[in-house]
Image (cartoon, rainbow, N blue to C red):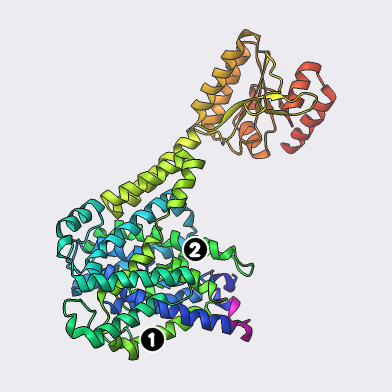
Amino acid sequence: MNIKKIVPIVDWLPNYQKSLFKGDLIAGITVGIILIPQGIAYALIAGLPPIYGLYCALVPQVMYAIFGSSRQVAIGPVAMDSLIVATGVSTLALAGSDSYIEIAILLALMVGTIQFVLGIFSLGFIVNFLSRPVITGFTSAVALIIGINQFRNLLGVDFIQSDQIHVLLEDILMQISFYNLPTTIIGLIAVSIIFILRKIDKRIPSALIVVVLGIVIMKFFGKNLTEVAIVKNIPSGLPTFGIPTIDFEQIRELFPIALTLVMVGYLETISIGKSLEAKQDVYKIRPNQELIALGLSNIFGSFFKAYPSASSFSRSAINQESGAKTGMAALISVVMVMITLLFLTPLFYFLPKTILAAIIIVAVFALVNVKEAAFLWRANNLDFWLLISTFIATLFFGIEYGITVGVGLSLVVLIFRTSRPYVVELGKVPDANFYRNKERFEEVIIEDDILVFRFDAQLFYANSSYFRDKMDEMTDKKGKALKLIVLDSESINRIDSTGVEMLKERIKYYQKKGVLFYFAGAKGPLRDALFKGGLLEIIDVNHFFMRANDAVKFFRTGDRKRQEKYAKYIHQAYK
């Protein structure tokens, strides 16, 4: 057992060098400065008191620093997961109530347990059924929903909260005339400042700057701005240990939203981790270890009053850009949050909620990926419509239904692509010994009495009928002149019993019509399956060739020596 793989901190901490500390210190402080106002803001999205956003930045970060395979990913509260929490928990309890808080913490325990189990049993591949277009469509839609939900705090109007955009827009249009002017002005100025500072340099703590400005304005001018809503009291002190209240009926009702959080949280972490991994050559991301790390972060986080946590796109990027080299940066961020919880929470009393809304809006609207949609429109129409379908489903039917539609469509596309793979007739390149796709190479020679074709996929129950139909279609075009069929098998990596039986049936059919059937380029695993399936009872081992050209040459000239040598090689392999 390699303890360094199970507990990655054992790998980097004993070898930690002083030269790394400066970068980790600067990155840890920078991320901590950004994390504190973001944590407060994202807790409001989740429908929780602001203090719970800071709780999410403690134990989960420590657990990830110990068990995470990435040394630069920043774990904690994130906008998308916070909205998903609000969507799921709000159906069971009143936002901000004690029961609401208990359910949100129980949800963290559920999410962590599922992630941990998936990681232990190396089941991370399950989440791969969410393709990149689905993730992009889902993320972009959720970003819009989060941003529009924050208009209630940005404009100072008590708009309805929902994860369906048409419900939100209808209520906003009806009540927008009641906007609060001072609240709106402060919020829009904050949005402008954050946007400008981010354009200048993303490492500038723009969120902290507008938070400080907002607090100063309300502290000294608050008597004239009584209609501007402020955060008010945030309790001081660290979270106490406690096991979440287990209610099996609530667990049953929360299970769909927990699965959504598992998938979204894992995909966020993997995509961020992979992008950071590409910028260095010190460590490698291990997907199943990431699931274990996320699971332990959420499990132990729930013991200390944290709601579901995941990795943050913005904070992870800033962590890397600020010079973070190891998980020490995360531990430094934790110390900053602890100091804030112990001594600095009274400073946030006068913080305007419109400032928090501005921070959230700028952060999430950056996740609306128009460039990806435009690229897919040019590069792959099917993936483009997959993105758009997921985007629209999430916008109009809600987050839970959006992710379900995305997974469902991904599976449909997967089945479609595997059941109808690329099949093409090959022609001989003039003055050469190889065959190429006749649709791409116009100069290839097509012979009337020979059909050479390629099938670009595994051959199994889902596409065996398609294989048969395409082969019959090509043989019908050849007509009665056809004397030889050569299957270029180089792209067929495996075959199941349905595929074997279909091949046996078609070979017998063509034998009755006086047409020979040869295999070219069949790999060892494919030959294993064919021979075990009884194919040699129908055709001879001499009907297997290394290349299509060898098969055609044998048919034309009877190159016995060359073929006997290859057949002898196959015989030796299967003794």
Q: State the image quarter where residue 99 is shown.
A: bottom left
Q: Work out whether 544 lies above or below 99.
A: above
Q: Earlier in the sequence, mark 1 or mark 2?
A: 2
Give the position of the C terminus as an image quadrant: top right
What is the magenta range? 11-20
Residue indicated by mark 2:
272
Residue in the foreground of this view, choosing between 454 and 160? 160
* Label 2 crowd bin: few (<14), some (14–19), many (20+), radius 10 Å: many
Task: Please name the residue shown 85% across and 25% down the image.
Answer: 561
Residue in the foreground of this view, choosing between 17 and 463? 17
Task: Please name the residue shown 35% across and 75% down the image.
Answer: 39
Q: Secondary structure at mark 1?
A: helix
Q: Work out whether 569 lies above or below 349.
A: above
| Residue 338 - label | 1
Give the position of the N terminus as an image quadrant: bottom right
Q: Work out whether 500 lies above or below 413.
A: above
